[in-house]
Image: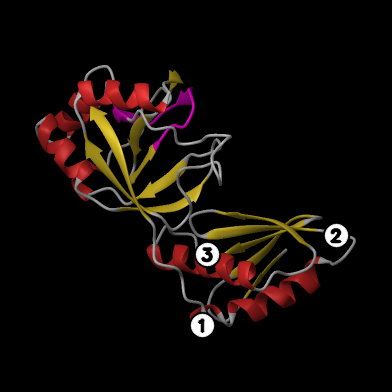
C-alpha cells in the first residue's frame, strides 16, 4: 500500500513492523536534506514506539513496535513531522579529511579509469581529491559511507565482474559515488587508492569514522606516509 503527501513524499508499508518514506526516487541533495531533517527532528522529538531508523539516499525506513502502534497511527505522526521539516536547522557538517595513497597496488584501477576519461592518472587523482563529498548515508557493511557526488569527469560504471576480495581501506568509485571499504569484502567498485585509517572500530565512540551529513575530502599521501600512518593506527 502506498500513500502520498501534497509535497510528493510517499509512504509504503514495508512490513508489519516497518514503514518506508520516500522523498522522490532520484538521488538529489534536496531529497537527502529532507532525509536528514526528518532524522534530526525525530532525534529532537522522539516518537514512543519507533525502534530504529534506517536512512538511505532519498528514503527512511522506520521500524516500530507493532504492539504500541499501527501503520496508520505512525503515518499520521510522521505526516505532521514532514510538515515541519523547513523549521529544522541541520547542524554544521563535520569536516573529515581521509589520507589516501593512490595508484599502484593500492589503486589497481586508477590507470584504467584515467584512460577511460582521456586524462592522466595524476589528473584523475587531482579531480578525486579536489571535491568535498557529502555522506549521504551508511550501508552495505558497518562503516561504509556512500559519498557523492563525483566530479562529472570521473563518473565511471562499476566493474562488470566484481572482485572476490577488496582490501580494507580501499577507496573506490562507481557511477557518481565514491566510498571507502571498511573491511575486506567482495566488491565491484573501481579502486583508485587506499587509506590506512580505520573506518570502523569497536572501541570508537560511534563506531564509524563517518556519519550521515559529514563532509569528506581525500588527501593524497605517499607510500612512505601510508606506511607510517598504518603503523600508528595499528
Q: Is residue 63 left or right of residue 213?
A: right
Asked if 233 appears above or below 90 in the picture, the reply is: above
Circle 2: element type: loop
> Looking at the image, can residue 10 be seen?
yes
N-terminal-most mark, 2 or 1: 2
**What is the span of residues highlighted in magenta in the rendered image?**
180-194
Q: Which mark is residue 213?
A: none
In this figure, which residue is indicated by the disc labeled 1? 87
73 or 2, nearer to the observer: 73
Q: Is residue 153 left or right of residue 134?
A: left
Label 1 near label 2: C-beta < 8 Å?
Answer: no
Q: Residue at x 18, y 36 (%)?
A: 125
Q: Residue at x 81, y 55 (%)?
A: 16
Rounded to the nearest angstrom, the CA distance separating label 1 from label 3 is 14 Å
234 or 129, nearer to the observer: 234
N-terminal-most mark, 2 or 3: 3
Disc 2 packing (10 Å; few <14; some 14–19; many ≥20): some
Where on the picture, by quarter, is residue 162? Answer: top left
Disc 1 packing (10 Å; few <14; some 14–19; many ≥20): few
Circle 1: element type: helix
Q: Is residue 132 left or right of residue 53?
A: left
* Residue 127 % position (x, y): 17, 44
In this figure, which residue is indicated by the disc labeled 2? 66
Amino acid at each position: 500500500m502506498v500513500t502520498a503527501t501534497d509535497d510528493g513524499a510517499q509512504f509504503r508499508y514495508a512490513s508489519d513492523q516497518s514503514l518506508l518514506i520516500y522523498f522522490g526516487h532520484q538521488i538529489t541533495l534536496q531529497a537527502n536534506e529532507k532525509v536528514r531533517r526528518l532524522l534530526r527532528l525525530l532525534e529532537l522529538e522522539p516518537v514512543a514506539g519507533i525502534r530504529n531508523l534506517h536512512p538511505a539516499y532519498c528514503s527512511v525506513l522506520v521500524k516500530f513496535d507493532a504492539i504500541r502502534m499501527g501503520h496508520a497511527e505512525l503515518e499520521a505522526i510522521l505526516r505532521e513531522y514532514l510538515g515541519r521539516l523547513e523549521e529544522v536547522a541541520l547542524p554544521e557538517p563535520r569536516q573529515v579529511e581521509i589520507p589516501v595513497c593512490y595508484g599502484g597496488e593500492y589503486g589497481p584501477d586508477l590507470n584504467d579509469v584515467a584512460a577511460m576519461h582521456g586524462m592522466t592518472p595524476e589528473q584523475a587523482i587531482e579531480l578525486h581529491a579536489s571535491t568535498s563529498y557529502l555522506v549521504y548515508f551508511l550501508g552495505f557493511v558497518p562503516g561504509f559511507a556512500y559519498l557523492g557526488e563525483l566530479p562529472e569527469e570521473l563518473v565511471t560504471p562499476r566493474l562488470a565482474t566484481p572482485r572476490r576480495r577488496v582490501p580494507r581501506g580501499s577507496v573506490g568509485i562507481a557511477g557518481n559515488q565514491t566510498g571507502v571499504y571498511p573491511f575486506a569484502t567482495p566488491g565491484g567498485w573501481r579502486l583508485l587508492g587506499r587509506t590506512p585509517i580505520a573506518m570502523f572500530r569497536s572501541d570508537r565512540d560511534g563506531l564509524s569514522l563517518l556519519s550521515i551529513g559529514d563532509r569528506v575530502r581525500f588527501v593524497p599521501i605517499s607510500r612512505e606516509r601510508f606506511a607510517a600512518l598504518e603503523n600508528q593506527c595499528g
